[in-house]
Image: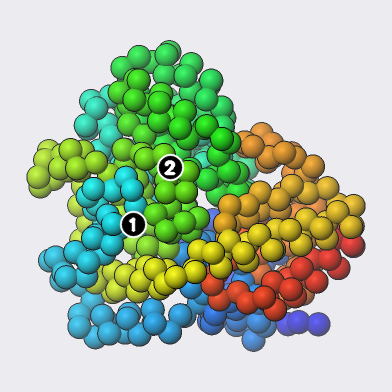
């Protein structure tokens, strides 16, 4: 029997000091009915808790760690950068190199600005869209998460879903009414909304593969349809690629699906596990940002040299040949074997996957939007999570999250995951 005494003691102390004992809500494990493990360290595909238990990790810091934990090259780059000074409040060579890499990789990026998180990237992209179009409204999709800025906390995906909070107190109604949240994959709803508010929609923002209601891929024609609607109306298309950027393909979902947005938000992988985000897009838009233009956005630690070093090193590792083929193979193998195990155990599931991100929904499906995702049997998910954890597998502690496979996950790791899943599913 594993021992969680240190985790429990520390979490108790944390609850006195931090709301819910955490610095980000989903870490509290409320949806799975357990107290969270306190993590002492990570290495490769594994994390180790403060009681010395090892887990094969499929959270990957919620997406960034595509190389696995403490990748030696990233650690070395961070150490080297830190030794040279951790922040200057002045432009450094690494920022230019990272910006060049991003612009070369992502089709829709002509210019970028670095920020410190995905939240900041999405918040700033919306300010730019509003400033450039002179329009107030934004269209988003139910179950998509774009960080916790006021304008986006309307039907906002995993954290909010898992907690059962609709929106959030503290968001003024006047702000919330400017956000229209529509069903994912429903072009007709978008057409109607744009028609109802002629000349008022600044932007349509979308996760080109949704990852925050569990993984929900775009249906054929959905992203291209959004592109057409934006072009016809004059509003801007924003792809929130904070998860999908450098995850589903080098160049992100826009490269994979061949649809180019006006603005792109990045984060997670491009920071290599350190706090980084970026937004960018068309040159005529980005030049409207201060100091070259009037729209204001700034950051004391933006483009931080240590974070940039981690990001650059991670992205360079992803440029090696065969990386995305390998991620695709691992993801495909895992999804196929899990589907087979569930079928053998007569547990109805729907597995949605794009590349190395996937979700096992405990519903016969299909899952194409938030309403479908909510059909999932959350009791079953909780049992599955608990069983897998007991077997040493650390899954995202919510049905409405993505499992992330990293390059550090070997075939043996995947095989022991499926073997454990077979046993757990058989007991449901
Ligand atoms: C994680 C996430 C964000 C927010 O990024 P933070 O770094 O957590 O602020 C925004 N958009 C999407 C799609 C995300 O998954």
The residue sitting at 46% across, 64% down in the picture is 64
Q: Can residue 27 be seen here?
A: no
Residue 7: image location, x then y, percent: 63, 77
Q: Is 236 above or below relative to 43?
A: above
- Residue beneath label 2, please? 258
Among numbered discs 2 and 1, the one appearing first in the sequence? 1
Residue 360: image location, x then y, percent: 71, 53
Give 140 or 170, whichever is nearer the viewer. 140
Farthest left residue in view: 292
Q: Quadrant of residue 21?
A: bottom right
Give 278 or 99, whichever is nearer the viewer. 99
Q: Is 193 above or below relative to 65?
A: above
The residue sitting at 43% across, 13% down in the picture is 196
How much space separates mark 2 and mark 1, taking CA atoms? 13 Å
- Residue beneath label 1, please? 105
Secondary structure, mark 1, is helix
């Amino acid at each position: 029997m594993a021992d969680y005494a240190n985790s429990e003691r520390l979490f108790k102390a944390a609850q006195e000091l931090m709301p819910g004992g955490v610095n980000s809500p989903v870490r509290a494990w409320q949806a799975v009915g357990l107290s969270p493990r306190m993590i002492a360290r990570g290495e490769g595909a594994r994390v180790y808790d403060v009681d010395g238990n090892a887990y094969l990790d499929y959270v990957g810091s919620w997406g960034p760690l595509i190389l696995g934990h403490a990748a030696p090259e990233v650690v070395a780059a961070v150490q080297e950068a830190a030794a040279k000074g951790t922040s200057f409040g002045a432009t450094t060579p690494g920022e230019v190199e990272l910006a060049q890499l991003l612009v070369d990789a992502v089709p829709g990026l002509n210019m970028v600005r670095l920020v410190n998180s995905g939240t900041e990237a999405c918040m700033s992209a919306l300010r730019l869209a509003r400033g450039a179009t002179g329009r107030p409204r934004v269209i988003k999709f139910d179950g998509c998460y774009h960080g916790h800025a006021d304008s986006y906390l309307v039907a906002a995906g995993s954290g909010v879903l898992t907690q059962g909070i609709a929106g959030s107190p503290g968001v003024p109604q006047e702000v919330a009414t400017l956000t229209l949240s529509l069903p994912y994959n429903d072009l007709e709803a978008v057409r109607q909304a744009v028609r109802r508010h002629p000349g008022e929609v600044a932007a349509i923002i979308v996760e080109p593969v949704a990852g925050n209601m569990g993984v929900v891929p775009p249906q054929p024609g959905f992203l291209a349809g959004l592109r057409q609607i934006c072009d016809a109306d004059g509003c801007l298309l924003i792809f929130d690629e904070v998860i999908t950027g450098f995850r589903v393909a080098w160049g992100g979902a826009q490269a994979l699906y061949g649809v180019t947005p006006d603005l792109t938000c990045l984060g997670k992988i491009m920071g290599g596990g350190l706090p980084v985000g970026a937004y960018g897009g068309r040159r005529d838009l980005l030049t409207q940002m201060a100091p070259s233009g009037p729209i204001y956005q700034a950051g004391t630690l933006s483009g931080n040299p240590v974070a940039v070093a981690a990001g650059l090193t991670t992205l360079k590792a992803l440029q090696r040949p065969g990386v995305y083929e390998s991620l695709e193979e691992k993801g495909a193998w895992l999804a196929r074997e899990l589907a087979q195990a569930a079928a053998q155990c007569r547990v109805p599931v729907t597995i949605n996957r794009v590349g190395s991100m996937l979700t096992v929904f405990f519903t016969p499906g299909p899952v194409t939007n938030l309403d479908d995702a909510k059909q999932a049997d959350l009791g079953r998910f909780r049992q599955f999570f608990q069983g897998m954890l007991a077997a040493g597998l650390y899954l995202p502690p919510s049905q409405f999250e993505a499992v992330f496979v990293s390059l550090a996950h070997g075939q043996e790791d995947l095989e022991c995951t499926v073997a454990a899943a077979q046993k757990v599913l058989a007991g449901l």
